[in-house]
Image: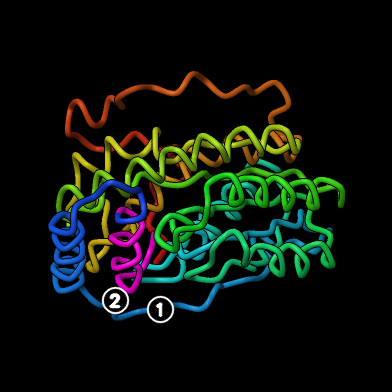
Amino acid sequence: MFGSRHLRAVAMTAAGLGGLSGALVGLLNEQGRRARVAIGVLEHLWPAPDGVYRDDGRDPLRFAVLGDSMAVGVGVTHPSQMPGVLLAQALAEEADRPVRLSTYAISGSTTRDLVPQVGAAVLDRPQVALVIIGANDVTTRMPVRESAALLGEQVRRLRDAGCGVVVGTCPDLGTVRPIPQPLRTIGRRYGLRLAAAQTAQVRRAGGVPVPLGNLLAPEFLARQADMFSSDRFHPSAAGYEAAAGVLLAPLCQVAGLWPGWAAPPVPLRSAAALAVGASRWPARLRRRHA
């Protein structure tokens, strides 16, 4: 999601809302300081395991992953748990052909950083692309309208290159418990506004938006210990599996593998959150890759 260095920016974003007293601004800054102390440090930061999955000598489906730390998979304990790997393997199974994974995502990226990522990706002419972006736009105070419009432009660049595009919109920052209230609620509201604007722009550009906040937040709130990594910011392997579970079908759709598939209505609360039980991920994503 986003690093602890951005917590002060979240507080200053809140201060910029206007009409806040000096005492409240001081409170928000203090809350950001306390959250930085509470956040852990990740022991493993793995390089992206790019390459061909299920290689049998045939021409592979070219799959690109762009965006920020959630696109990279920061927080996992083994490279095989990264979302790009999970989805490349699942796509290869669904397509019954090899899939070449190319990761352009960089941890800490904002939507402005998508511009060079897309520039590098289009040179390789991907057929399918996944973009996950937005959390750092909130924490660095990037205006919602500017952020969403820029995302739409980058999706259009990929579409003009003949690539099907799926975008995981801004996650719900209200699930990050180390951020105390009311700072957490402020971050959540900004994130939800951005996700809504991203959805509109992605659709206009011909991409398929996936509302990660609406789909995943209830389960992340209900199963904090399972769904977050040791730093309590980034998803764990289980959290990334849950994300992959909601991203697979749209990726299959834009790849032409499930042409009749349509996104179901977004639930207000997931069954997993209500039951505080185990997720029901697709069977292919339940496997742990040693």
Instruction: Indicate whether residue 6 is drawn in magenta.
Output: yes
Q: Residue at x 53, y 67 (%)?
A: 109
Q: Which residue is mark 1?
A: 45
Which of 37 and 30 lies nearest the eye of the viewer? 30
Q: Residue at x 40, y 39 (%)?
A: 213
What x and y, as percent, mark residue 101? 66, 63
Specify start and end residues of the magenta stretch as a single range.
1-14
What x and y, as percent, mark residue 151? 65, 50
What x and y, as percent, mark residue 18? 33, 48
Instruction: Indicate whether residue 167 is drawn in magenta.
Output: no
Which of 141 and 80 lies nearest the eye of the viewer? 141
Q: Look at the picture and state if 86 lies above or below 26.
A: above
Q: CA distance from mark 1 to mark 2?
A: 7 Å
In the picture, measured across the screen, residue 146 lies left or right of residue 98, that is: left
| Quadrant of the frame with the C terminus | bottom left
Q: Residue at x 22, y 42 (%)?
A: 221
Q: Within 10 Å of the Cα at label 2, are there few (<14), some (14-19), or many (20+) other Cα atoms?
A: some
Secondary-structure class at tag 2: loop
| Quadrant of the frame with the N terminus | bottom left
Kindly identify the amino acid type of the residue bearing the numbered disc 1: Leu
Q: Which residue is mark 2?
A: 42
Tell how many labels. Answer: 2
Secondary-structure class at tag 1: loop
Point out which mark residue 113 bears: none
Which of 15 and 243 lies nearest the eye of the viewer? 15
In the picture, measured across the screen, residue 279 lies left or right of residue 136, that is: left
Q: Within 10 Å of the Cα at label 1, are there few (<14), some (14-19), or many (20+) other Cα atoms?
A: some
Kindly identify the amino acid type of the residue bearing the numbered disc 2: Leu
